[in-house]
């Protein structure tokens, strides 16, 4: 039985979610409750609000806080070649199949600051495929998208990512894809030109094009089951027959309605193939 304090907290969080949806059009009502509550509490601290209820007037009247709200609630944390074995498997088992297509669209959903999209572009370049690829990297967090679009990282980060790059099957150096100067590293334009960063909300936006691969990692974990099912349906509808779906290590197709459209390529690494031959 939840305590009085917990019940009050739950009401406050519900009111914040409603204010955000009705005032700003961002619907967090189907996000996983426990982690959402923690993040709403963190938001109150960040904005100097003594209680969660004190967030309400700010949400209703202060337009300027929206980027802070989205950044706190949406967890835009990422890395290059995160879980390198997943990238290695994509390199070894998925790219050879994609290589047989004349043109390729890839949807990287929940891009955060872009490091996952950069990693994909590098692997596609090394596989000799980048020239025929368009990567659509999408997120609801516009501040993160703007950073992704810049393609600039602290130079010491690149050195830290070299190990993951090699574990992902890279045989060159990561640094060669960046121009270095003044402590920063800028992603080569020849890679970034193949990535379109765009605002897309998995809750409320629909299919925007047919894609050969969807990579959406560490996003569904923040959603409850009904929203996960909705988003998996969106991915299924976006994928061409024979297309590939890559989820995060703690995410799965579970008992979703979309599940029967997919066969596992690697269960452990959460790689799936949409049934049917490519058209
Ligand atoms: C933890 S990051 C994952 C980044 C990257 N995919 C990775 O695994 O390193 C989760 C991202 O999902 C995004 N996100 C959360 N809700 C979303 C939604 N409704 N639509 C699109 N993106 C969303 C967040 O803004 C955040 O950038």
Image: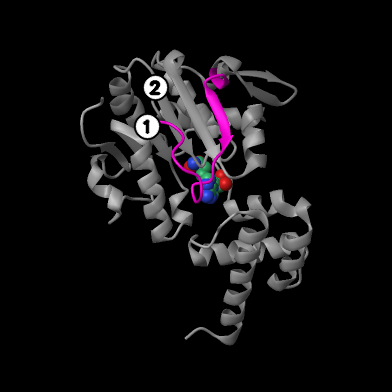
State how the image is colored.
one colour
Horizontal and vertical percent position of residue 255: 27, 56
- Which residue: 48% across, 22% down? 122
Tell me if residue 201 is in the magenta stretch: yes
Horizontal and vertical percent position of residue 163: 48, 30
Label 2 sits on residue: 104
Magenta segment, which residues? Answer: 191-213
Horizontal and vertical percent position of residue 148: 61, 32
- Front one among 85 and 229: 229
Vertical arrangement, residue 217 with respect to residue 24, above or below: above
- Which residue: 63% across, 40% down? 144
Alpha-carbon distance for marks 2 and 1? Answer: 8 Å
- Which residue: 47% across, 23% down? 134
Label 1 sits on residue: 213
Vertical arrangement, residue 271 with respect to residue 133, above or below: below
Answer with the quarter of the image where residue 158 lies.
top right
Tell me if residue 278 is in the magenta stretch: no
Q: Are marks 2 and 1 in contact (CB under 8 Å)?
A: yes
- Indicate the quadrant containing the C terminus: top left, top right, bottom left or bottom right: top left
- Front one among 121 and 29: 29
């Amino acid at each position: 039985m939840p305590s009085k304090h917990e019940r009050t907290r739950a009401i406050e969080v519900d009111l914040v979610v409603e204010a955000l949806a009705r005032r700003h059009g961002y619907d967090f009502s189907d996000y996983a409750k426990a982690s959402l509550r923690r993040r709403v509490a963190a938001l109150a601290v960040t904005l100097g609000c003594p209680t969660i209820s004190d967030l309400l007037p700010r949400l209703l009247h202060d337009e300027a806080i929206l980027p802070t709200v989205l950044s706190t609630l949406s967890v835009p944390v990422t890395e290059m070649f995160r879980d390198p074995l997943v990238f290695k498997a994509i390199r070894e088992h998925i790219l050879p199949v994609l290589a047989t297509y004349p043109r390729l669209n890839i949807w990287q959903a929940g891009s955060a600051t872009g490091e996952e999209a950069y990693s994909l572009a590098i692997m596609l370049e090394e596989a000799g495929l980048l020239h025929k690829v368009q990567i659509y990297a999408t997120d609801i967090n516009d501040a993160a998208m703007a950073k992704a679009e810049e393609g600039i990282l602290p130079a010491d980060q690149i050195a830290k990512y070299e190990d993951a790059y090699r574990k992902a099957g890279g045989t060159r150096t990561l640094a060669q894809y960046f121009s270095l100067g003044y402590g920063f590293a800028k992603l080569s334009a020849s890679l970034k030109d193949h990535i379109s960063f765009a605002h897309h909300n998995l809750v409320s936006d629909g299919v925007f094009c047919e894609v050969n691969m969807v990579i959406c990692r560490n996003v569904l974990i923040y959603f409850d089951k009904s929203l996960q099912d909705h988003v998996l349906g969106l991915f299924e509808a976006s994928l061409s027959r024979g297309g590939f779906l890559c989820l995060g290590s703690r995410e799965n197709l579970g008992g979703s309605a979309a599940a029967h459209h997919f066969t596992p390529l690697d269960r452990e690494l959460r790689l799936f193939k949409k049934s049917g031959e490519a058209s």
